[in-house]
Amino acid sequence: MKRDPSPFRCGFVHSLLGAFSLTVALGAAGSAVHVLGSPDAASPSMRVALFEEAPNDAPQLNPRLPGYEQAVGFADLPASAGTVSDAQQPDLGVEYNAGAPVRAAASPQTATRGIRINGKTVMPGQTFSQVAGDDSNAPALSAVNAAPPETVVAADATPLMRNARAFANPEGKPTVSLIVGGLGINRSRTMAAINELPPEVTLAFAPTAENLRSMVRDARRAGHEVLIEVPMEPYDYGRQRPHPQVMQVGVSADTNKQRLSRMLARTPGYVGVMNYQGDKFATEPDAFRPILSDLKEKGLAFFEDGSLVRSQFSSGARETGVAYGKASAWIDSRPGADEISQQLLLLETTAREQGAALGTGMSFPVTLDILKDWIPTLEDKGILLAPASYHATRSRTSGQVRQASLNPQG
């Protein structure tokens, strides 16, 4: 006796047949439209750009092509095929050679050629804000641009003197200096710090950064002073991957000096160095005193980032005579808006009480945004934003280093 077909089986088979038929019909229809259809009958389309496009009259030029500098308005520079060398890059007018650094004399073209921005001529080494306002309110240019082009740097001029940004405070107003560190690791944050912060803000670069020489040149071209961060031994040195050239307590002074020289040889253009970590190294005078003496001989300044609890760097700086500055506030040790604002308020108070204050921070986006809003308010408060070199040289001449080392509790 023949059994009736299963309802479940019939439903499953009919579903497969229906899906297959629908697929065939849609495929045939799509093929017909593709072959027989007209493109003119398609729906209107719109192109949406995620970033602002350059105007048609300002094409984007490849900076590696010969003639790039002349095309964008920089002074004529020596040309070579294919790549842009250090000699081709417009810098602050300093020529580095085996002998004494000599100021490069400016040609007539150098004195007149620049980039036109909103009707203003911006020369290499300047920022638009420096030429946009009245001459009386414009910030001072960098040290090498402020002097006459034909001036020759003295043979015994130190890197601190050559590379410091010009700054004057004839009225003796309180000053605040800022160092933004950790640069060179993240390129977008590095370029944001270079291009968005005022030139009076000093920038500190990690010695392991790729293209360090190029980024330091960009920073100096924007008017910033530059520091090199020197890694120093922390207490938990064995738990983390150390830098190969770290300053250590358990090695000889000559070894530490050689390591320092290797890091400083990667690029010219800095005014000094700043510690990276180093809470153990900073408590061993026998280890750090030769390094401070070496920095003194090299004509460099030394800055302490304010993160070291039991540091003895200040006493070592007095003994060796090195130009020295210690941060009174690490503004973004807790990278929150409220905490950063409180540390900036502390900087203002310290500046009014001691005449000068130094703060350090990292290139966190929140830090950069708050600094861009806070810095313009200093002038109305009677406080000047000064480069870090001014803080270091002022400390050496005014005895502020000695005052900063006093125990606040008596």
Image (cartoon, helix red, strand yellow):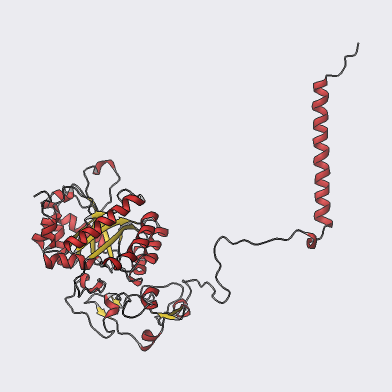
Q: Quick check: 303 above or below 15?
A: below
* On-image quarter of the N terminus: top right
Q: Residue furthest bottom?
A: 108
User: In this orientation, does residue 237 appear?
Assistant: yes
Q: Is residue 398 left or right of residue 88?
A: left
Q: Residue at x 19, y 50 (%)?
A: 248
Q: Residue at x 88, y 14 (%)?
A: 3
Q: Residue at x 39, y 65 (%)?
A: 196
Question: Where residue 65 sits: x, y (%)?
Answer: 48, 74
Q: Residue at x 33, y 76 (%)?
A: 138
Task: Quadrant for residue 390, please give it.
Answer: bottom left
Q: Residue furthest front?
A: 380
Q: Residue furthest top?
A: 1
Q: Residue furthest right?
A: 1
Q: Is residue 277 left or right of residue 32?
A: left
User: In this orientation, does residue 386 appear?
Assistant: no
Task: Quadrant for residue 20, please give it.
Answer: top right
Q: Is residue 33 left or right of residue 124?
A: right
Q: Quick check: 123 above or below 287?
A: below
Q: Nearer the viewer, residue 254 or 347?
A: 347
Question: Where residue 106 sits: x, y (%)?
Answer: 33, 85
Question: Where residue 164 sits: x, y (%)?
Answer: 24, 71
Q: Quick check: 3 above or below 310?
A: above
Q: How many marks?
A: 0
Question: Where residue 200 sits: x, y (%)?
Answer: 30, 68
Q: Is residue 369 left or right of residue 174?
A: right
Q: Quick check: 203 above or below 285?
A: below
